[in-house]
Image (tube, rainbow, N blue to C red):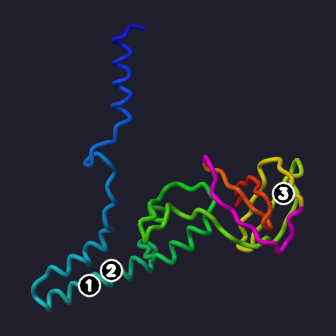
Amino acid sequence: MHYGHRIAIAASALALAAPLPAAAQEKDPPRSAALKKLVDCRSIGDAAERLACFDREVAAVDAAEAANKLVVVDREQIRKTRRTLFGLALPDLGIFGGGDDEGEEEGVSRIESTIKNVTRGSYGRWIMTLEDGAVWAQTDDRNLPRWPKAGQPIVIKRAALGSFMANVNEQNGIRVERLR
């Protein structure tokens, strides 16, 4: 390959790896139309008109929420939902990820629970149902010195490359995946 072509290829690779300008990066999603109309009521100068606007738009937001066209959740509901979805491969909807609140990392990095039920799957690998109904299956061939039992504590953590490690009753970790 000619030396000039190598430089051109290297320059192209650097250009592709460079971060996009701020204007080209994805922006925060816009507010819902119903919420924007409600917030816009604050800019009305006349008190009677402003109150009428608030009354009208609050009724519209209430009706949209009652009809499941608008969903309002608080941070605690998001934290609980992140925990129940831990380990499941879901599309990024932008509502349960983000981690911009109070220094929290992206989603949940670990869960602590109790084993509700244990069975052996193919190749003698463990399948464990947790108290919240989540089902996790062993994916590696590591042996546990003490077999998992119902009632034992389990800690599941995010590991490298999207995998998960489970520590059953404080034993060495085994690699697991969430089935449901």
Q: Which residue is mark 1?
A: 56
Picture coordinates of residue 131, whole percent (x, y): 74, 74
- CB atoms at circles 1 and 2 under 8 Å apart? yes
Report helix, strand or loop for mark 1: helix
Q: CA distance from mark 1 to mark 2?
A: 6 Å
Which residue appears at 65% of the width and 60% of the height? Answer: 157
- CB atoms at circles 2 and 3 under 8 Å apart? no
Compared with 7, 25 (above or below) is: below
Q: Is 158 in the magenta?
A: yes
Between residue 57 and residue 114, name the one nearer to us. 114
Q: Which residue is mark 2?
A: 60
The residue segment tinted magenta is 146-161
Residue type at the position of mark 2? Ala
Question: Mark 3 or mark 1: which comes first in sequence?
Answer: 1
Compared with 83, 179 (above or below) is: above
Residue type at the position of mark 1? Arg
